[in-house]
Image (spheres, helix red, strand yellow):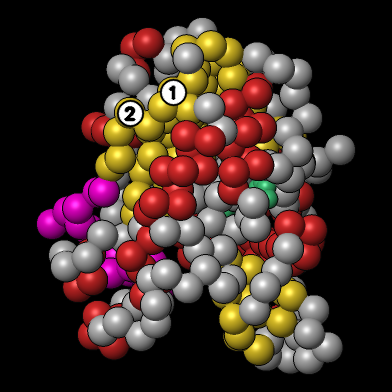
Amino acid sequence: MIQEPTVSVPDHDADPEPEATRRDAGATESARANRGWWDRNADEYQTEHGTFLGDDRFVWGPEGLDEVEAELLGPAEELKGRAVLEIGAGAAQCSRWLAAQGAHPVALDISHRQLQHSLRIGGGIPLVCADAAVLPFADGSFDLACSAYGALPFVAEPARVLREVHRVLRPGGRFVFSVTHPIRWAFPDEPGPEGLSVSGSYFDRTPYVEQDDEGHALYVEHHRTMGDRVRDIVSAGFRLVDLAEPEWPAWNSSEWGGWSPLRGNLIPGTAIFVCERD
Ligand SMILES: C[S@@+](CC[C@H](N)C(=O)[O-])C[C@H]1O[C@@H](n2cnc3c(N)ncnc32)[C@H](O)[C@@H]1O
């Protein structure tokens, strides 16, 4: 059972600094590492980004593209009554917006602590703590699925997640998901000018891993090229109907990790894939 978080400040200063490296990391190791990382860092993440995300907005990424204007899931008035699965929902901000449109969202995340923040914010969104690679739902349970940077950048086998989403969607269903734009892999993850020079190969799929001094992964990110993403989508049985690359808007002066106005004005930071199943 997921209970509302009590206020506690973990003493991360006492933790030894993890080593950042590039090495293979399989599905189980990646899921275990990321579950732990998001549980340990959920409080800090929500404190740092909660205002930008809004409690009940649907923001697709650090550029601030809002579903109200993007309508990638379709016109807002058509969301009423639809069963929607949000994957890697965090504190379920997007689900809260969907519920306000009259949809019936379910918010799924691998991190218990992230989901506890949904209880803190409130709104009565149904929450499920599970790995996106093994969705605990019957075939054809949802009309729509969505994910704003949830799960897909972190899993070793994104095609498996896509097959699972395809399975739980009804025919005609749509899955829209955002991830770090693949081109960013070739650049240092820095918001300033140092983040503008290519430092590695776009084609090198070796995962980014932070590990402890015994070599246990503490955080993992996986890279797919644009072509890999398209092939994953098509091989799972979806049709790719749109690919949005939000431009950095003039109103947004915020930085989010390596995403900044400086870089956002020159190179894309987010890719949003709009997929449909027949
Ligand atoms: C960058 S956050 C995005 C959350 C939310 N959409 C937002 O914008 O704040 C990534 C989320 O993906 C979740 N996640 C990572 N790996 C996952 C997996 N294998 N299955 C489900 N959720 C996962 C994390 O726990 C985290 O809450």
Residue occupying the point 83% across, 88% down: 214
Secondary structure mostly seen in the magenta stretch: loop
- Please, what secondary structure does the residue beneath circle 1 have? strand
Task: For label 2, count other residues whose C-alpha is less than 10 Å away and answer few (under 14), some (14-19) or many (20+).
Answer: few
Residue occupying the point 28% across, 69% down: 260
- Asked if the residue under mark 1 is in contact with the one under mark 2, i.e. CB atoms within 8 Å, the reply is yes
Amino acid at dot 1: Glu
- Seen in the image, is 97 located left or right of residue 89? left
Residue 201 position within the rendered picture, expressed as x and y whole percent measured from the top left: 39, 77
Q: From the viewer's perspective, is residue 27 above or below residue 100?
A: below
Residue 246 on the magenta span: yes
Mark 2 highlights which residue? 241
The quarter of the picture where residue 46 lies is: bottom right
Asked whether residue 116 appears in the rendered view, the answer is no
Residue stretch in magenta: 245-260
Q: Does the beta carbon of the residue at mark 2 sit less than 8 Å from ligand 1?
A: no
Residue 156 position within the rendered picture, expressed as x and y whole percent measured from the top left: 65, 57
Q: Nearer the viewer, residue 267 or 104?
A: 267
The quarter of the picture where residue 251 lies is: bottom left
Amino acid at dot 2: Val
Residue 86 position within the rendered picture, expressed as x and y whole percent measured from the top left: 57, 33
Mark 1 highlights which residue? 276
Q: How many dots with numbers?
A: 2
